[in-house]
């Protein structure tokens, strides 16, 4: 992701606000150095029209409120430490004075609050819907603890399913329909848009759009059970050509070669895995777990827990419950030969 | 029967109470002590209905829950201090954060304030007890048993585990098969009984048990704060009790209120929970803010600036507080109109808070601050209040909340609100009223240490949580990867939270040392203005030897305030010693209009509380016969409670004390 470039672009516009924010919001200066590294840092980075107005709003609110806080802290310090005439220590101040403090203080606060409220509502209106008709509609369904992604088209032969990794074309609005298969989850790709809950029995929707190519991390934000912490996804924004190529690959059924160990691995898969996992082009049609025909095209596995390398994959299959305790998949007990056969089979799922 | 006829023929007083003096040591005073003191030993301990004892029990019990919730938090902070720690399993972490929330929100923050109000209200209002002393005892016992109930499954590893707001369907039977959620559901319904009867007691006490002359514009702000909180509770608790009851029905009897497959609605839970939840948030901060409004002026040597404005802002907050609940649900896919409306009300609710902030600032500015420990806590509180309020304004901006919602920013916000606006005033309040509670002063040096350690630890621990939230860290994750960029802020938070805990520890040490060796306190060691400081420290069982007549908001400062010729009468007042008695007054003007016969001590509240808790235990364990038996025992306790008593009958005077009473 060309992180720094876009970041600088946005910062330049509101540099002064930014400086105030950093100076005041970051007493732990070490945190600043980590900003670049933090892949969910929506406060400083935004890459789409559904989130950028919110980011600017965040800067305006933060800088204004921090400034007012400093003023109030100074007033308080003044009130505590200001010099006073020495008086009779038993004297008591008069009751009916000081009302202008309340009139002025509340009056000014009310004006500021109303202005902020109007600004927030205008921003809400801006990000509520995209400026033009969405080019693509996706349905993302939350499961314990992964994401099913369906690419809808009018032509049912062009429909396909994938998991945990969403590819979108850059520069066009995408409509995301949100469902849940079990409990409440929340879909959140903070650098592209705010979050929306995925509620069983309800279809919510939101839109996302990426201005620049890149990988944007998403994370479930509604507590959904023991592995809520390990429920992330990636949105990969690509140019139209790359996206088209990716779509074409995904639409194809799995192309499985017929080497001996691959066959053995496939048998094993059908026997042990196909109750939950599906691979188009084979008899595996399970619908409880991620769809795997193009497993190797994915960057991460286990809803973001591990990078997708053959080693990690085998480690994952045999040690699910120690890597992601409570996950719906059991740790598979496989002999060395079974393991290599399965590995050979899975390696063909490009 | 003749008594009843007599009193109905004269609706005001059926006898005119004698006005007189009862200095310490006089025969009248000794008679009052004899009437009001509880029996010594365990009998008195179980049967007492003295609001002061009940208030202290509330304070101590709530504080123990605070410490338990605090330990849970510290364990979680160890787990989160560094990325990919394995100190806790995910399930243990879930139970810890759920119990931490349940404990702090339900078992600490409101009960501790009920403790203050229970102890202080009758003393501030010039009464001898609360309106319903036995109900008061019942409220405490049920709170205690509900707290124990909520904790029984913890050692077995089956504690509530769906977060304190317990969203369905995760909390439903399909995804949560153990007893965890049943414990939570039944415990909350039980606790709701305690809160409701407590709230009713406060409301009636305010309107009927004020000293003669204490018209409604003369009551201390703490009374306003607890009154509004109590109104909020009376209206809000039914929503949450209903929600938990429906959930329990879903889980145990197969109803479908929240069951999606059969047309149930998960969003119904969120609405019911937050319709309760948000007013509750104000119920647990308004009395604490009122503690500051009452106690801060003492240390500024002047009355609070803008008494009426602050009292009105308290009530406005609660009224608006019933219209903001959906701001917890901005991310649930609400229509634009609802988003805009609730975003706007959530912003507007800051305005009454601004009134309070400027009232406190003006009070300090125009006063002459005395830098005692309580003052430090109250001044520090003002800063924390502003931070918590401002992060609240940020979350009220709907688009920003789409990002902030369910991240650590919210965790930071709610801790600034609950610790900043509840714990700091509470600890300040304990430093302030400790001499009244126990007759000894707390140690100043340790007090200042405890403030600074707490204040620094708190900000070091909780401010970085805002940053963690802005860096995208979601709530309720049991661990995180090193490349997420959250390691430093979490380490700082963990260090800060331990420093904060040390501050609390210093405070506790101070309490224990001062209980034994603190300097003896006079009646009014801080030279404070309100009525509770006119009683000895600690106050006798009967509170006031004579019911005082009150002429102003600051009865003990009247001579120095010069705001009129009228003076309160504290030494001379109604004697009222034909059994346990206090005066009842009209709701607004506080004109005396009835002598209230107060009940004797009774075991009934303890047993009613115990047996109701056992009913819930029976329901939890599906012991039908046991449950029925306990229901029977509850009925018997109620009969014992209501058993007609001679001493509660208003009799025509036979005693020579009440000369001139035989009119009407």
Image (cartoon, coloured by chain):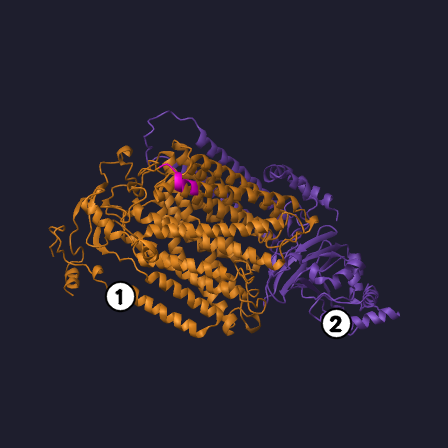
* Secondary structure beneath label 1: loop
> Left or right: where does residue A349 sit relative to residue A112?
right
User: Is residue A169 something that shows in the picture?
Assistant: no
Q: Residue at x 73, y 46 (%)?
A: A3
Q: Quadrant of residue B447?
A: top left
- Circle 1 packing at 10 Å, graded few (<14), some (14-19), many (20+), is few
Q: Residue visible at 61% across and 45% down?
A: B467
Which residue does the numbered mark 1 point to in the structure image? B643
User: What residue is pinned by disc 2?
Assistant: A274
**What residue do we see at 81% from left, 71% from top?**
A266
Vertical position of residue B593 compared to residue B646: above or below = above
Q: Position of residue B343 (x, y in %)?
A: 51, 52
Q: Colour of chain A?
A: purple
Q: Nearer the viewer, mark 2 or mark 1?
A: 1
- The percent coordinates of residue B362 (x first, y second) are 41, 36
Picture quarter with the C terminus of chain B:
bottom left
Q: Is residue A205 above or below residue B555?
A: below
Name the residue nearer the viewer: B654 or B530: B654
Chain to which mark 2 belongs: A
Q: Secondary structure at mark 2?
A: loop
For chain B, the rendered hue is: orange
Foreground pick, A339 / B60: B60
Question: What residue span does the magenta drawing correspond to?
Answer: B511-519
Gap between marks 2 and 1, in whole Å?
71 Å
Residue A251 falls inside the magenta stretch = no
In this rendered view, identify the residue nearer to me: B100 or A4: B100
Is B512 inside the magenta-drawn segment? yes
**Do the dots labelled 2 and 1 sit on one chain?**
no
Q: Residue furthest right?
A: A259
- Prevailing secondary structure class for the magenta stretch in the rendered image: helix
In x, y percent, where is residue A146? 68, 62
């Amino acid at each position: 992701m060309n992180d720094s470039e876009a970041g600088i672009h946005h910062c330049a516009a509101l540099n002064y606000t930014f400086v105030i924010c950093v100076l005041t919001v970051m007493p732990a200066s070490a945190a600043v150095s980590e900003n670049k590294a933090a892949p969910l840092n929506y406060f400083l980075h935004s890459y789409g029209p559904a989130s950028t107005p919110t980011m600017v709003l965040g800067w305006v609110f933060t800088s204004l409120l921090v400034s007012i806080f400093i003023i109030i802290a100074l007033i308080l310090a003044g009130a505590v430490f200001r010099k006073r005439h020495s008086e009779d220590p038993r004297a008591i101040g008069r009751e009916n004075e000081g009302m202008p403090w309340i009139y002025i203080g509340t009056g000014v606060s009310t004006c500021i609050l109303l202005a902020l409220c109007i600004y927030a509502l205008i921003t809400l209106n801006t990000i509520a819907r995209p400026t033009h008709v969405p080019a693509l509609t996706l349905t993302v369904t939350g499961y314990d603890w992964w994401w099913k992604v369906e690419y809808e088209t009018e032509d049912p032969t062009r429909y396909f399913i994938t998991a945990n990794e969403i590819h979108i074309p850059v520069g066009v609005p995408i409509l995301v329909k949100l469902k849940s298969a079990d409990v409440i989850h929340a879909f959140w790709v903070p650098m592209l848009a705010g979050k929306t809950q995925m509620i069983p029995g309800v279809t919510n929707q939101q839109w996302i759009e990426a201005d620049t190519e890149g990988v944007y991390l998403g994370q479930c934000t509604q507590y959904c059970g023991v592995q809520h912490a390990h429920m992330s996804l990636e949105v990969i924004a690509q140019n139209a050509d790359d996206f088209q190529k990716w779509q074409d690959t995904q639409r194809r059924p799995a192309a499985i070669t017929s080497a001996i160990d691959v066959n053995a691995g496939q048998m094993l898969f059908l026997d042990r895995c196909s109750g939950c996992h599906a691979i188009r082009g084979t008899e595996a049609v399970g619908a409880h777990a991620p769809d795997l025909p193009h497993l190797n095209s994915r960057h991460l596995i286990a809803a973001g827990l591990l990078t997708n390398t053959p080693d990690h994959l085998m480690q994952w299959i045999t040690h699910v419950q120690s890597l992601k305790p409570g996950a719906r998949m059991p740790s598979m007990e496989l002999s060395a030969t079974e393991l290599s056969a399965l590995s050979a089979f899975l390696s063909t799922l490009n | 029967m003749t008594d009843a006829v007599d009193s109905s023929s004269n609706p005001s007083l059926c006898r005119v109470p004698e006005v007189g003096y009862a200095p310490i040591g006089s025969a009248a005073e000794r008679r009052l002590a004899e009437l009001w003191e509880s029996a010594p030993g365990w009998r008195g301990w179980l049967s007492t209905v003295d609001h002061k004892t009940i208030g202290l029990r509330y304070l101590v019990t709530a504080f123990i829950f605070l410490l338990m919730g605090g330990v849970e938090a510290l364990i979680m902070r160890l787990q989160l201090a560094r990325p990919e720690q394995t100190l806790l399993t995910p399930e243990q972490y879930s139970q810890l954060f759920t119990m931490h929330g349940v404990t702090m929100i339900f078992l600490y923050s409101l009960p501790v304030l009920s403790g203050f109000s229970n102890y202080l209200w009758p003393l501030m209002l010039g009464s001898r007890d609360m309106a319903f002393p036995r109900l008061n005892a019942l409220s405490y016992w049920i709170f205690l048993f509900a707290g124990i109930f909520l904790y029984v499954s913890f050692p077995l590893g089956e504690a509530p585990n769906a977060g304190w707001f317990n969203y369905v369907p995760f909390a439903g039977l399909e995804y949560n098969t153990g007893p965890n959620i049943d414990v939570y559901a039944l415990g909350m319904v039980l606790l709701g009984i305690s809160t409701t009867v407590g709230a009713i007691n406060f409301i009636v006490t305010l309107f009927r048990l004020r000293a003669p002359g204490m018209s409604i514009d003369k009551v201390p702000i703490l009374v306003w704060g607890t009154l509004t909180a109590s109104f909020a509770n009376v209206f809000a608790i039914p929503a949450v009790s209903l929600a938990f009851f429906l959930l329990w029905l879903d889980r145990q009897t197969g109803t479908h209120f929240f069951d999606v497959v059969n047309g149930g609605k998960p969003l119904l839970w969120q609405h019911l929970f937050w319709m309760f939840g948000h007013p509750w948030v104000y119920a647990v901060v308004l009395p604490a803010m009122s503690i500051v409004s009452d106690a801060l002026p003492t240390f500024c040597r002047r009355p609070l600036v803008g008494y009426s404005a602050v009292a009105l802002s308290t009530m406005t907050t609660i009224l608006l507080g019933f219209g903001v609940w959906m701001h917890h649900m901005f991310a649930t896919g609400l229509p634009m109109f609802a988003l805009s409306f609730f975003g706007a009300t959530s912003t507007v609710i800051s305005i009454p808070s601004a009134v309070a902030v400027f009232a406190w600032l003006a009070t300090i500015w125009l006063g002459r601050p005395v830098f005692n420990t309580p003052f430090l806590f109250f001044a520090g509180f003002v800063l924390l209040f502003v931070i918590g309020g401002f992060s609240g304004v940020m979350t009220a901006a709907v688009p920003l909340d789409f990002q902030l919602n369910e991240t650590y920013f919210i965790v930071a916000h709610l801790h600034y609100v609950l610790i900043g606006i509840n714990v700091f005033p509470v600890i300040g309040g304990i430093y302030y009223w400790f001499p009244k509670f126990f007759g000894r002063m707390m140690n100043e040096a340790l007090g200042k240490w405890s403030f600074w350690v707490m204040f620094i630890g708190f900000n070091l621990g909780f401010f970085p949580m805002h940053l963690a939230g802005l860096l995208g860290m979601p709530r309720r994750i049991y661990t995180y990867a090193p490349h997420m960029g959250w390691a430093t802020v979490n380490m700082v938070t963990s260090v800060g939270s331990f420093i904060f805990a040390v501050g609390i520890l210093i405070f506790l040490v101070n309490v224990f040392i001062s209980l034994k060796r603190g300097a003896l306190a006079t009646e009014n060691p801080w030279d404070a203005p309100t009525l509770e400081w006119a009683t000895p420290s600690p106050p006798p069982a009967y509170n006031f030897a004579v019911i005082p007549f009150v002429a102003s908001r600051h009865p003990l400062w009247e001579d120095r305030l010069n705001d009129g010729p009228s003076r309160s009468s504290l030494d001379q007042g109604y004697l009222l010693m034909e059994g346990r008695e206090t005066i009842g007054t009209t709701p607004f003007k506080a004109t005396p209009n009835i002598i209230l016969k107060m009940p004797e001590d009774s075991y009934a509240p303890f047993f009613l509380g115990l047996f109701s808790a056992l009913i819930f235990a029976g329901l939890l364990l599906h012991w039908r016969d046991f449950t029925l038996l306990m229901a029977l025992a509850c009925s018997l306790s109620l009969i014992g409670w209501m058993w007609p008593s001679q001493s509660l009958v208003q009799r025509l005077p036979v005693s020579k004390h009440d000369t001139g009473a035989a009119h009407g």
